[in-house]
Image (cartoon, rainbow, N blue to C red):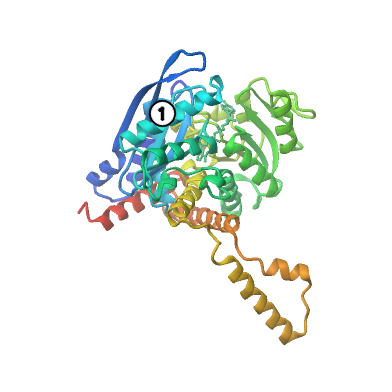
Amino acid sequence: MSGDTSFLDQVNRSFDLAAALTDHPPHLLAKIRACDSVYRMAFPIRRDDGTVEVVHAWRAEHSHHRLPTKGGIRYATVVNEDEVVALAALMTYKCALMDVPFGGAKGGVRIDRKKYSEGELERITRRYAYELYRKNFLGPALDVPAPDFGTGAKEMAWIADTYIQLSTGDLNGLGCVTGKPVAQGGIRGRAEATGRGVYFGVREACAVAEDLKPLGLPEGLAGKRVVVQGLGNVGYHAANFLAGGGAVIVGLAESEGAIHAPDGLDLAAVVAHRRATGRITGFPGATDLAHTTLALELDCDILVPAALENQITAANAPRVKAKIVAEGANGPTTAEADAILRQRGVMVIPDIYLNAGGVTVSYFEWVKNLDHLRFGRMEKRFEEGAYRRLLQAVEGATGKRFTAAEMATATQGADEEALVGSGLEETMVQAWHEVRTTRNKHRDRADFRLAAMVNALDKIVHSYEDLGIFP
Ligand code: NAD
């Protein structure tokens, strides 16, 4: 990525370009752009062999304009302060854009999780949670982490348990973290939420014929050829939902290699093959690529980078063949690459919009924890009774008789999973059309990334106006 600027500089550059399209006061924009607090820590953990190792970790709270702050925790060897602050800033803009009432935050622990046993990972996670708690960087009203690269439901359960042990009597303790297992205060649909949000966003973008025409693509998702980089939480679910929506997965990339099959790959079979052999390569009927990053240059309609930042750079952007880059990961396209893609007429669906499904459903989980009530519990049977009475009235008035199967389908009340899916879809669809409206208003100067950032800035400024802090 030589020649490309740092991740934080890229986020700030995007902010500055968007700010120039607004007439908000400079002092307020400077306040929004700055990161409010960063906690850098180093703590010892005992390895299984008895030795002691020092672990370096961070938590950045980018903006306290809304509380709590919210953002994932990443376990990776490349974690550093610049990256954590950049990701926290993206969270601020993402939450504002999606009308999720949180400030942005992000955490990072610099480890290669593959090198640690489960017991060691538990000790690292609990000590990290303890450090956050000690400095008021953890709590349902303060700062609420979630999974990110290298972490999942298990780590979130350890964090919740650590917090609850330390904060005796906090009735809302489970709301200190989201992405928990369902049995421990999690919400149905959170695990797949980011990937599902990617699907809703791509589907919406592909539904607008006037936006697809300049790309030389017909409207609709059906038959679109998709390449996905990263088969983790975001990438796997995005690929799965996109395939379910009629797209054809023609390429997949993982850290160990990449595969290509112009006629389409069976995602479930690829996952089973990787589980059995430890590698994505060697999948029957597919071609192995010489290097995993070459997947980004495959012939396709939609490229979904869903692994890490800085994957599409000034070096490979001229060779990207996709007409649409759908950013599942945070910051996968450098600023230099973004300019090249834009000049080449590639549509970029930006990260702060497209991967916001995770934080949207995290918001639902946090609300559920504070309410101490599962969504749908009160109304599901009531709704079913109301629909049944309505259909019976139709039967009485028309003489038509519904079959038992028709009756069962039409009278189904909404449960938690259905409500989460509906809330996520509504949020993604609404935000995309707001982004389009802004893009169309500034068509000569703004692409979708800039338009999303403008919307985020406008919403943050309005929230400061509501607070009456700035004149
Ligand atoms: P994950 O750890 O579940 O999955 C990442 C996957 O990418 C892993 O399978 C890993 O092996 C693979 N990978 C790593 N390096 C690679 C490379 N060079 N080429 C191909 N594959 C590679 O992480 P995740 O939660 O899916 O996060 C992925 C991205 O999405 C990150 O940028 C993260 O910040 C972003 N994101 C995640 C969420 C979420 O809810 N988990 C929400 C918003 C954004």
Q: In terms of image quadrants, where is residue 57?
A: top left
Residue found at x 52% / y 33%: 151
Q: Position of residue 378 (x, y in %)?
A: 54, 65
The location of residue 191, given as percent across then percent down, is: 57, 43
Q: Is residue 436 above or below residue 139?
A: below
**Residue that appears at 46% across and 30% down:** 125
Q: Is residue 343 visible?
A: no
Q: Nearer the viewer, residue 247 or 72?
A: 72
Residue annotated with mark 1: 127
Whether residue 153 can be seen here: yes
User: In the image, 63: left or right of 386?
Assistant: left
Is the shortest distance between ligand 1 and the CB of mark 1 under 8 Å?
no
Quarter of the figure that contains the C terminus: bottom left
Quarter of the image for residue 63 reads top left
Name, please, the residue furthest toward the left: 471
223 and 96: which one is in front?
A: 96
Using a 10 Å C-alpha cutoff, classify the residue at mark 1 as few (fewer than 14 neighbours), some (14 to 19) or many (20 or more).
some
Ligand 1 found in image quarter:
top right
Left of 460 or right of it: where is 317?
right
Position of residue 134 measured from the top left corner of the image (x, y, whole percent): 32, 34
What amino acid type should be assigned to the residue bearing mark 1?
Arg
Q: Position of residue 44 (x, y in %)?
A: 39, 20
Query: How many numbered markers are drawn?
Result: 1
